[in-house]
Image (spheres, helix red, strand yellow):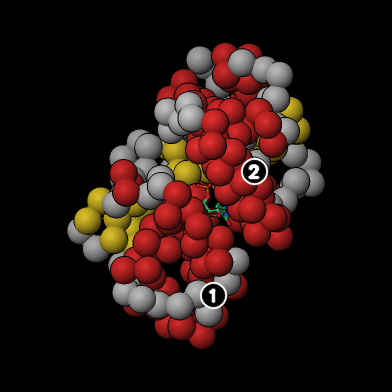
């Protein structure tokens, strides 16, 4: 029997299904789950609230002082000071700005350190863009979830209850803009197993991923 891996890295573009798949996988394996996108979103929220511009100089200072904390829940919440901001991080306004903060080296460095400490502390699934390549290059299991842009836009619209055609078009444009801006931070890690989810149901993706993780489901 194969031993269950200590960390599982799940990477992929926006709306590839990585959060949903990671959540179910972590539950089934009894692992912690950290969606690292929440940390970049929380940093952007804090910076916008404090009117800190998306420049290396300003953000190097700000990231050292901002109290951005990962919670101890099985599915990690993210806190700014004592405020749980987890439910305030998924909206289009924040998404219009998050990439400009997430691409800054001092921000990445500080958040990556916390992600590594988290993975050292818990058996965990970490989801993001650079987990398998940069954050945890030694992760014993790396999965890259891909999906074509139409499939991802459809998923995002149904998650957000967007039915109106004009709004759906806007949402697809926002997704493709973010793809371009996040491309430099998104890696297909060496040793990663690629699953193209465009034509698969969530259950099919989960079945494959559970098979790869080999933990007792
Ligand atoms: O996966 P997401 O959409 O929640 O990510 C939010 C933003 O953070 C997105 O612009 C990409 C960025 N991100 C990143 O640069 N590296 C990660 N490991 C996770 C997210």
Circle 1 residues within 10 Å: few <14, some 14–19, many ≥20: many
Is residue 199 shown left or right of residue 18? right
- Residue at 31% across, 40% down: 73
Q: Assign a secondary structure to mark 1.
A: helix
- Residue at 58% across, 48% down: 174
Question: In the rendered image, which residue does mark 2 sit on?
Answer: 13
> Which quadrant would the N terminus be assigned to in this image?
top right
Instruction: Tell me how far mark 1 sits from mark 2, CA to CA.
Output: 22 Å
Residue 85: where, in percent of width, then height?
Answer: 29, 52
Residue 176: where, in percent of width, then height?
Answer: 66, 47
- Residue at 42% across, 37% down: 32
- Residue at 72% across, 51% down: 187
Say above or below: 37 vs 107: above
Front-lying residue, 26 or 184: 184
Is residue 17 shown left or right of residue 35? right
Question: In the rendered image, which residue does mark 1 sit on?
Answer: 106
Q: Indicate which disc, 1 or 2, sits on the residue closer to the N terminus.
A: 2
Q: Assign a secondary structure to mark 2.
A: loop
Q: Residue furthest bottom?
A: 57
Mark 1 close to ligand 1, CB under 8 Å: no
Say above or below: 4 vs 128: above
The label nearer to you, 1 versus 2, is: 2
Circle 2 residues within 10 Å: few <14, some 14–19, many ≥20: many
Is residue 86 shown left or right of residue 169? left
Q: How many numbered discs sit on the rendered protein? A: 2
Q: Are circles 1 and 2 on residues that touch, CB within 8 Å?
A: no
Viewer can see residue 5 = no
Residue 189: where, in percent of width, then height?
Answer: 74, 47
Viewer can see residue 70 = yes
Kindly indicate the quadrant of the structure image that contains residue 185.
bottom right
Residue 147: where, in percent of width, then height?
Answer: 70, 32
Front-lying residue, 184 or 3: 184
């Amino acid at each position: 029997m194969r031993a269950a891996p200590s960390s599982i890295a799940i990477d992929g573009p926006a709306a590839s299904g990585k959060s949903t798949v990671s959540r179910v996988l972590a539950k089934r394996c009894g692992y912690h789950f950290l969606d690292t996108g929440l940390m970049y979103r929380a940093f952007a929220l804090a910076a916008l609230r404090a009117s800190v511009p998306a420049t290396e100089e300003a953000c190097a200072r700000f990231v050292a002082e901002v109290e951005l904390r990962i919670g101890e829940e099985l599915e990690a919440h993210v806190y700014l000071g004592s405020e749980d901001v987890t439910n305030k991080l998924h909206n289009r306004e924040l998404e219009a700005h998050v990439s400009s903060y997430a691409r800054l080296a001092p921000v990445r460095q500080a958040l990556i350190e916390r992600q590594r400490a988290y993975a050292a502390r818990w058996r965990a699934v970490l989801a993001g863009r650079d987990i398998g390549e940069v954050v945890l290059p030694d992760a014993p299991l790396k999965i890259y979830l891909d999906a074509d842009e139409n499939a991802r836009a459809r998923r995002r619209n149904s998650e957000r209850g967007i039915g109106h055609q004009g709004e759906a078009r806007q949402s697809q444009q926002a997704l493709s803009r973010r793809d371009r801006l996040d491309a430099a931070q998104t890696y297909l890690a060496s040793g990663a197993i690629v699953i193209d989810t465009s034509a698969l149901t969530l259950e099919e993706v989960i079945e494959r991923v559970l098979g790869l993780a080999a933990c007792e489901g």
